[in-house]
Amino acid sequence: MVIVGITVIFKHSILINCNDSIKQLLKILDEDYKAAELYGEREKDIILKSAMSGVKICRFWLVSATLTCFMFPAKAIIEMGNLYMRGEFKLVPMFDFTYPNFIEVHKESTVAYTVLFLMCLSFDLFSLSIYIGFDPLVPIFMLHTCGQLELISNKLVNVFSKDASRQDIVDDLKRINVKLQNIYKFVKMVQNIFIILYEFNMKTTTFLLPFSVFQIMQSLRNREISLEFIFFFSGACLHFYMPCYYSNLLMEKSESLRNAIYFSGWESRRDIGIRKTILLMLTRTYVPLGIKTVFYPICLDTFAEMVRQAYGIYNIMNAAWG
């Protein structure tokens, strides 16, 4: 819970300190959606598909975070109800903490329990609001970028058509390059805001996974099912897996764009200026777009490496205390 507390405070500080930059990113999304009203049906479908995928991410986070956060107070209340029905009532804390001595000796009194329960519930609700409102942001930004890259790939199919004049080709390539430059600026802005956060998330998730699995296994050894930590484990996996998945998707779309540039039919035109433009575009897209931490790219390979490290930590914990 200390790790979770530090994480949500860190995310809240990003929302405050990078408020203007995040608003600028959201403004770019709104402008692209307004521009899509003038597109053809096929282009509109691409934009709509990326937008609906973003909505699904928000709903998925809403369900996952709500279940995880409310499972802790729900378990405490249900357990107290069961104890009351058996005539063995006692106060059950939301989080089973060991407090400093001056709190520990009084924590089972009604007043101290109520205060501690309300404080833990406030922390729970604050964490819920941050996870629901913050974590879908980067996946939505990456999905939007994937949609924009797909639009460019579709435009490249008809650039070198037989009926196109040289001036039409030059104008189309200019518009595509301007759009591509804006996309790279958009991704760089996202990168600058969240680079430290995802390095931090990768490190904390490496510890949260074995900690929660250890709690689950200890409960199973006691012939109990720890639902709250099962949901906590799934939420911790989702917390780092989802950015890795959509960043990996962005890298694939970027590579598909590079292939679309190469197979656009430029070889049918002998104009040196056009060929130089294509060469510059291929050079520009040589390194796939994606989000990076300080030391690692955010992708599925990085997620797999994090899981391997978490498994090693769990084995150490299990050998020491299991």
Image (cartoon, helix red, strand yellow):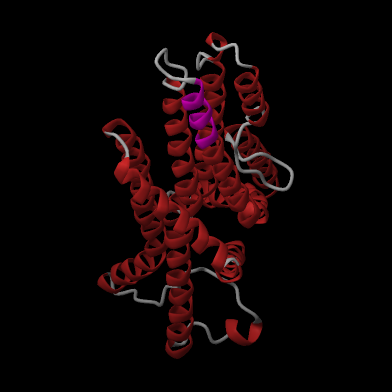
Question: Is residue 220 in view from this perspective?
Answer: no
Residue 215 at x, y percent in the picture = 53, 52
Residue 263 at x, y percent in the picture = 52, 14
Residue 178 at x, y percent in the picture = 55, 40
Q: Residue furthest top?
A: 268
Q: Nearer the viewer, residue 139 or 223?
A: 139
In the image, is 83 to the left or to the right of 179? left
Residue at the image point whose x is 48% and y is 60% from the top? 134
Q: Nearer the viewer, residue 65 or 159?
A: 159
In the image, is 184 to the left or to the right of 77? right
Image height of 95 relative to 108, above or below? above
Image height of 198 relative to 280, above or below? below
Image height of 239 relative to 286, above or below? below
Specify the segment rendered in magenta. Answer: 166-175
Q: Quadrant of residue 291?
A: top right
Residue at the image point whose x is 55% and y is 45% from the top? 182
Residue at the image point whose x is 26% and y is 33% from the top? 41
Q: Residue furthest bottom?
A: 111
Image height of 143 relative to 255, above or below? below
Q: Nearer the viewer, residue 75 or 252?
A: 252
In the image, is 55 to the left or to the right of 231? left
Question: Is residue 78 in view from this perspective?
Answer: yes
Main secondary structure of the magenta stretch: helix
